Amino acid sequence: MAAATELTVGQVAARSGVAVSALHFYEARGLIRSHRTSGNQRRYGRDVLRRVAIIRIAQEVGISLAEIGAALESLPEGRTPTREDWNLLSTAWRDQLDQKIAQLKKLRDGLTDCIGCGCMSIDKCPLRNKEDRLSAQGPGARRLLVAR
Amino acid sequence: MAAATELTVGQVAARSGVAVSALHFYEARGLIRSHRTSGNQRRYGRDVLRRVAIIRIAQEVGISLAEIGAALESLPEGRTPTREDWNLLSTAWRDQLDQKIAQLKKLRDGLTDCIGCGCMSIDKCPLRNKEDRLSAQGPGARRLLVAR
DNA sequence: GCTTGACCTCAAGTTAGGTTGAGCTTGTAA
DNA sequence: TTACAAGCTCAACCTAACTTGAGGTCAAGC
């Protein structure tokens, strides 16, 4: 192919470091878009690279694909993020990351306090009590306890 | 039942805040043990509460059940952790937690640097480059990157 | 002795984020 | 023109950590 602006799925995979199957998957989830050649093959604009990059970064931060999709959708016209948009998205995601870090720190401090105290005594341990409160929030498929 | 030392699965569930089905599950995975009544019902010693507490805490820290199981197994005689054992386990797990926190911090700092820089340019962004390195570590179901 | 609630087992379903494979079509380089 | 790499679709599989359901048993109060 010529060095046109169009990229095949294999090229996007190579340049983004994401497997072809994952790209198919993202497309099925509506996270990226492509158009097809007459032969039904996918062709991507260069902007897809930025989009994929954003997706991967957000994933690393711990954002689910569903949330990432929603965030991208919510942009005016569902456009590929401009610098401005990226500013907003990344700020929001950084804040989530901050929260997650804070949560883990709290957990670590609790753990630190408990080390050596033999405090697994059912009623007094702060870690355990946290646990109890969670379970008291009702039954049903409790999702993962840690920010994700 | 009398106020004996023995607990039914329902009682353990109530006191530990873990669903009965989860207790069955832990038992199938070898994380906890029980003996059976003549009527084939499970009965637990009180130590199971401590064991379950440890399991949940470790899970919160982001340790998988498999790893938790291995850690418990590795204790002499596969016994329920004494204060001493708990000391060791929790210290190790806290260190893992520390690492995870450090990792997230690095990610956050990268994100912070990138906010507003519009740096999603394919070749220069530090976040993106990290990405590349990760994906270069081979295929296969890459596990979640973030502390779960 | 009957009803009710707690238990039992085993199989199948769930969610997330993909991967793998089969079977078939396209595209391109020699 | 012929071969082979790349693409396509769709379904099935994978892991983790459980939950849900079906079908059947046990125990205890009235």
Image: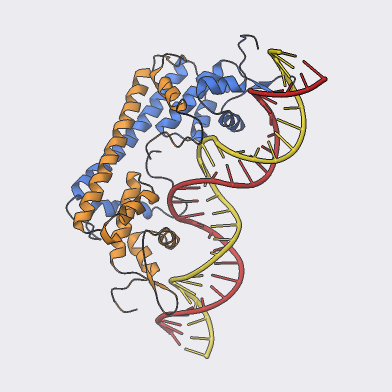
Chain colours: A orange, B blue, C red, D yellow
Residue B111 is left or right of residue B6, and the answer is left
- Looking at the image, residue A22 lies above or below residue B83: below
Seen from the viewer's position, the closer of residues B142 and A145 is A145
- x, y (%) of residue B129? 28, 54
Task: Look at the image and tell me whether residue A79 can be seen.
Answer: no
Among all residues in the image, which is located at the extreme left? B117
Among all residues in the image, which is located at the extreme top? B3
Q: Quadrant of the C terminus of chain B?
A: top left
Tell me the residue at 42%/31% (across/down). B60
Residue B131 is left or right of residue B37, and the answer is left
- Looking at the image, residue B140 lies above or below residue A115: below
- Looking at the image, residue A53 lies above or below residue B86: below
Residue D15 is left or right of residue D23, and the answer is left
Task: Look at the image and tell me whether residue A131 can be seen.
Answer: yes
Q: Quadrant of the N terminus of chain B?
A: top right
Residue B4 is left or right of residue A132, and the answer is right
Tell me the residue at 56%/31% (across/down). B22
- x, y (%) of residue C23? 61, 71
Tell me the residue at 33%/31% (across/down). A104
- x, y (%) of residue B70? 52, 31
State how many labels appear. 0
Quarter of the image for residue A109 reads: top left
- x, y (%) of residue B95? 36, 29
